[in-house]
Image (spheres, grey):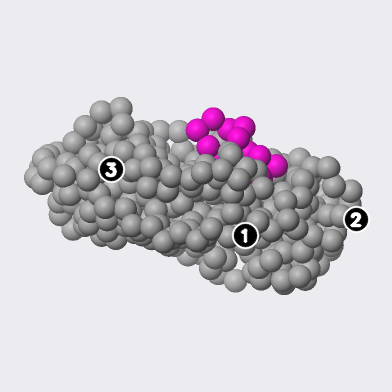
Amino acid sequence: MKKDFMFTSESVTEGHPDKLCDQISDAIVDHCLRQDPFARVIAECAVSTSIVFIAARFAVDGTVDFPGIARRVIGQVGYEQEAFNPKTCSIVTSLRELPVDRSLRFDERTLPDEEIERIPVRNQVTVFGFACNQTPSLMPLPIWLAHKLARRLTSVRLQKILPYLAPDGSTQVGIEYKDRKPFRVHSLTVVTSQNREGDPDPERLRKEIREAVIDEVFGDEAIRPDNDTRVFVNPDGPFPVGGPSIHSGLTGRKNAIDTYGEYSRHSGSALSGKDPVRIDRIGAYAARYAAKNIVAAGVADECEVQLSYSIGLSRPVSVQVETFGTGRRPDGEIAGALEKAFDFRLAGILRQFNMRHLPGIVKGGFYRKLAAYGHMGRMDIGLPWEVADKIHLLSL
């Protein structure tokens, strides 16, 4: 196993076209579950110049204004340019209302264990959860820093610290590792769109991004850019307007950004746009929950948890653990402890995390908040899978 290496991770702002699609899709999920916690919905979105396409299959006891939800999200993200804005963009829908499936309208909060056991998954998937002790959130440092930079890029735009910025932007952070521990910042890249081409000029843009974004983000970090760190701001030149008028977007196309920045494996299934009965979504959250508790308990410095589900069964057919040589117990023994301490059944996860009812409890919706800046490691939202409450069951 490599001990010394360099690793990069990328993040994007909420105005990136792929993330815009994720937010529209998850806003639809929030809307459906807010009206009907037992709603079923799969919503996918694509955007391009002046057009939004929404494909959805749904069964909900209520009404859904799909174009209205999309226009509201587009406006909130900040698209007001002539080339793409919520008032003039065309919205095309392909909608299919599904028959109500009574077998899925169960209330997991009131079911006895034998009923939980009889509720199978309807999808087959292998999901991964990861945690490590590189950051306070137990996330890999490259994706942690990339998200911080992307959030700050949006913040300085909204606060009008840099009022010339447009919503679309991306960040990348390269970290050098020694003995599998972060050692130094190798490189930083910030790409941001501007409301008008040539305003400001490249030199001023680099200076102000460095001061208002990069320096602010690294002010409280233990590892900071040094004299040899390569810093790039819009290295390909001006990026006027950005967004769907420049490049298209699609729901679920940023899985690495949603999870661990490629530092760990992740499922090929999209997370956004799915109601919580989809095990390919909530199983990924359960795997992260397990991995985080292992690292928080001091059982390993790094941990990847793999859960494999087959259609028709309630439990994963395989629970695997990899601690990359950092475990203080054998990996197989840790996997056995997980199966005893955690409920990886579909209805058990729904009950543990209250997944169907959070959109009606959290102000402004729940799932849309996950659609930008990561589904894992968030410290700005009280995510149930980020709680380290099983330490006592795993500690040495």
Q: What main secondary structure does the magenta stretch of the protein show?
A: loop
- 238 vs 241, nearest the viewer: 241
* Side of 287 where 89 appears, left or right: left
Q: Residues within 10 Å of mark 2 (few under 14, many from 20)?
A: few
Would you call the spot at circle 3 few (<14 residues within 10 Å), some (14-19), or many (20 or more)?
Answer: many
Residue 357 is situated, as x and y percent measured from the top left of the image, at 66, 39
Give the residue at mark 3. Answer: 86
Q: Which mark is residue 129?
A: none
Q: Label 1 amino acid?
A: Pro
**Residue 366: in magenta span:** yes
Q: Which residue is mark 1?
A: 99
Magenta residues (range): 354-367
Q: Which residue is mark 2?
A: 114
Looking at the rendered structure, the secondary structure element under dot 2 is helix
How many numbered discs sit on the rendered protein?
A: 3
Q: Is residue 128 left or right of residue 320?
A: left
Residue 172 painted magenta:
no
Q: Earlier in the sequence, mark 1 or mark 3?
A: 3
The residue depicted at 76 percent of the width and 40 percent of the height is 389
